[in-house]
Image (cartoon, helix red, strand yellow):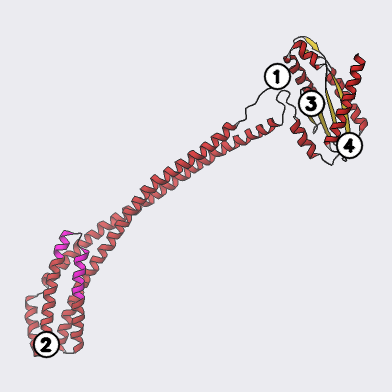
Amino acid sequence: MSAGTHSPPFGTLHRIARMMQLSQAIALALLLVFGALLWRNIADFRNADALVDHTHEVQEEIDRVRASVMLGGLALRNYAISPRPEFLERLARTSAESRDATERLQELVQDNPSQTTRAREVHSETTEILGWYGSSSVIAQRDGAAALQASLAARVNIDASQRLRELLDVMDTEERTLLEARRDARETGFQSVKRWSAAIGLVFVLFTAGAIVHAGRLVGLGESRLKTLHDDAEKDPLTGLANRRAIDRAAQAQAGRPMAVISFDLDLFKPVNDRHGHAAGDQVLRTVAARLQQQSRHGDTVARTGGDEFVILLPGLADVKVLEGIAARVRSTVGEPIDFDGVALRVGASVGYACSDGSQRFEQLAAQADAMSYEEKKRGKVGRV
């Protein structure tokens, strides 16, 4: 008699593992590529934003130079009208602020050659004006307000600060033009960051959704295969009946409850194998198994536990009279002829049985049924002799 073989479906589990590895690798690659692109766009946006801030700083310094020089001249004129010390103190403060502003302006525009040239000239013009402020202050303190008024009148006539105003206006105009261009660049960079962020999010959503769907299909298939594997592990491959492992598990579930056990092996089975071959023996086993399943109740467990050995577990049955009738039907069913290539094969069954109200374990009942089956087989041999 031959037995079928079964290959466990580990291929599905392997596919799931490979799918997970591939998904992680693709996700990592996407993260690196899109992350690098997004980082570059963020860097461009930050640079554009920094340039906008830089332009504002330049404009602020231009306004500081303009305002401090103007306030210095105003303080000097106020002193000529009303020679009070606080006007000279104010002149000193604004002069210092003008010098700081022109130096700061030169530092800020070093990246712009044309503005750098103008900033130097602004510094030169401012230094000249501040020098005149200083000398006028000395004249005022030494010669009085009248001398200062005469000096101021001469200065007004030549408009000494005109060149400084023109330079500052030109610088301010260029910075406004730069500011507009840099704001446009910043907005473009910001929109690019938004687009790339949205694209990355969309790609990850689609990829993740696809991976989840595919993984779900594989997991579902894997669960189905695992269930099949589990079922096959508790099934006799030749007859499709439960095996010893399955009937032991079913018996454990009935522990402490009423149950009955029928046990038998086939009589005259070896001569069938010897005369007609293992194919005939397999046919006998499959036919007997099919008949037993047809005769069994829902919830009964019919198992092939050896070569030609069968065990039936009947949950909830503790009536020995009913059990005797079932054993008789099993014996009669097994004894019916079995067709094999036009030959009527006959086997018998030495049936043993035992039942309990729950006070006995399955192993004890199986031992009692085996002992009865063995005694019946001996009686059958004696009868045949």
- Kind of residue at badge 1: Ser
User: Could you tell me which residue is drawn at 76 percent across and 31 percent down?
Assistant: 244
Mark 4–mark 1 CB contact (< 8 Å):
no
Residue 107 is covered by the magenta coloring: yes
For the N terminus, the image quarter is top right
Question: Which residue matches tag 1?
Answer: 2
Q: Secondary structure at mark 4?
A: strand
Residues at marks 3 and 4, CA–CA distance in whole angstroms: 23 Å
Residue 109 is covered by the magenta coloring: yes
Q: Which callout, 3 or 1, points at the residue further toward the start of the chain?
A: 1
Residues at marks 2 and 4, CA–CA distance in whole angstroms: 131 Å
Instruction: Return the mark for residue 293.
Output: 3
Mark 3–mark 4 CB contact (< 8 Å):
no
- Using the image, determine if residue 250 lies above or below residue 78: above
Residue 139: x and y in percent read 9, 86
Q: With 131 as the anchor, is 259 left or right in this view?
A: right
- Kind of residue at badge 3: Gln
Residue 52's quadrant in the figure? bottom left
Closest to the observer: 339 or 175?
339
- Kind of residue at badge 2: Ala
Residue 215: x and y in percent read 54, 39
